[in-house]
Amino acid sequence: MKFLIIIILITIFHEVKATNFPKIYGCFCEGGIITGKISENSALRIDDQKILTYNNRFIFAFGRKFKENIKIEVDNISKEFTVKNKKYKIENIRGLPQNKVEPSKKELDKIISDQQKIKEAKRIGIKKKLFNQKFILPSTGRLSGVYGSQRILNSKPRRPHAGIDIAAKEGTKVIAPSSGVVKLVQRDMFFTGNTIIIDHGLGLISIFAHLKDIWVNEQDEVVQGKVIGSIGMTGRATGPHLHWGVYLNKTSVDPMTLINFELN
Ligand SMILES: [Zn+2]
């Protein structure tokens, strides 16, 4: 009898262990990212696609337009999650120099070369988590642009806004919103002007555009809160502001979700 009870207890314990689903951090929303850790030798699938892990950590981004439901599977346990949809604004921006909306042939060559550098910097670099539990705003000022808005520049429809804008006086300090390593420092890019890219690890990067000053160099390690530059209006800008964009690989992420949600 005693033996039987032990067997039953072991069976129950095993079942409890087997249904141990990982705690998932982040925002189940369009523009959000989720992350967490699974146990050694476990496999994680999202909608039947295997997700790469680094030291058992997974990270996944929902794009600007994402379907309402996903299935997350860890080994043989599967759960459905709802991904919150967003409504995006249409933003009309006027007063830009016309060449910043319709560039010349020569300018297009410069744009292609700039974009190549940015594309390189978006590639997965550091394969460990450097980012903090919560991001902080990289500058103080007025939130003048939100993530995802459909943009109409000088009456021409252009790509949705891949980040947030913080408008402030020229020279206002810009700080690292999360720890990482400076991956790119480039002055005078056609659209983004004086630009910094920070690698937060695992393919998560931040881009800072339209800067006046840049006070870091490529390969510098930065901790959250370190001053990296100052607000300017270089590149395509109608006034001094910081454009802060976040990407996970090629997917544009809403920076505000990283401030409002914990990533553990
Ligand atoms: Zn912007």
Image (cartoon, rainbow, N blue to C red):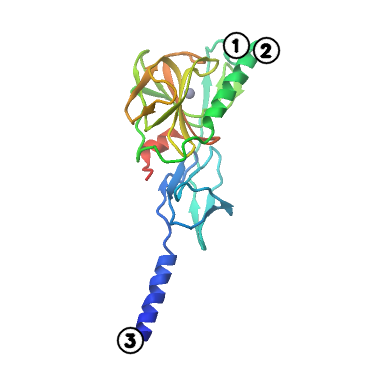
Q: CA distance from mark 1 to mark 2?
A: 10 Å
- Residue 115: give x, y in percent of width and height: 58, 23
Determine whether the residue tagged by mark 2 lies in a helix, strand or loop: helix
Ligand 1 within 8 angstroms of badge 2 C-beta: no
Determine whether the residue tagged by mark 1 lies in a helix, strand or loop: helix
Q: Identify the residue at horizontal 51%, vertical 32% (top origin).
A: 148
Q: Identify the residue at horizontal 46%, vertical 42% (top origin).
A: 33
- Residue 219: give x, y in percent of width and height: 43, 26
At label 2, the amino acid type is Lys
- Please state which of the two labelled residues, at mark 1 or mark 2, is closer to the viewer: 2
Q: Identify the residue at horizontal 37%, vertical 42% (top origin).
A: 261
At label 1, the amino acid type is Asn
- Residue 51: give x, y in percent of width and height: 54, 49
Q: Which mark is residue 105?
A: 2
Tell which of 40 and 62 is nearer to you. Answer: 40
| 185 over 48 or under it: above or below | above
Q: Which residue is the site of mark 3?
A: 2
Q: Which residue is the site of mark 1?
A: 99
Which comes sooner in the sequence, label 2 or label 3?
A: 3
Packing grade of label 1 (10 A; few <14, some 14-19, many >=20) is few
Q: Identify the residue at horizontal 38%, vertical 71% (top origin).
A: 13
| 131 over 51 or under it: above or below | above
Drawn side of residue 257 relative to residue 236, left or right: left
| 198 over 57 or under it: above or below | above
| 103 over 131 or under it: above or below | above
At label 3, the amino acid type is Lys
Which comes sooner in the sequence, label 1 or label 2?
A: 1
State whether residue 160 appears in this view: no
Image quarter (top left, top right, bottom left or bottom right) of the N terminus:
bottom left
| Quarter holding residue 2 | bottom left
Packing grade of label 2 (10 A; few <14, some 14-19, many >=20) is few
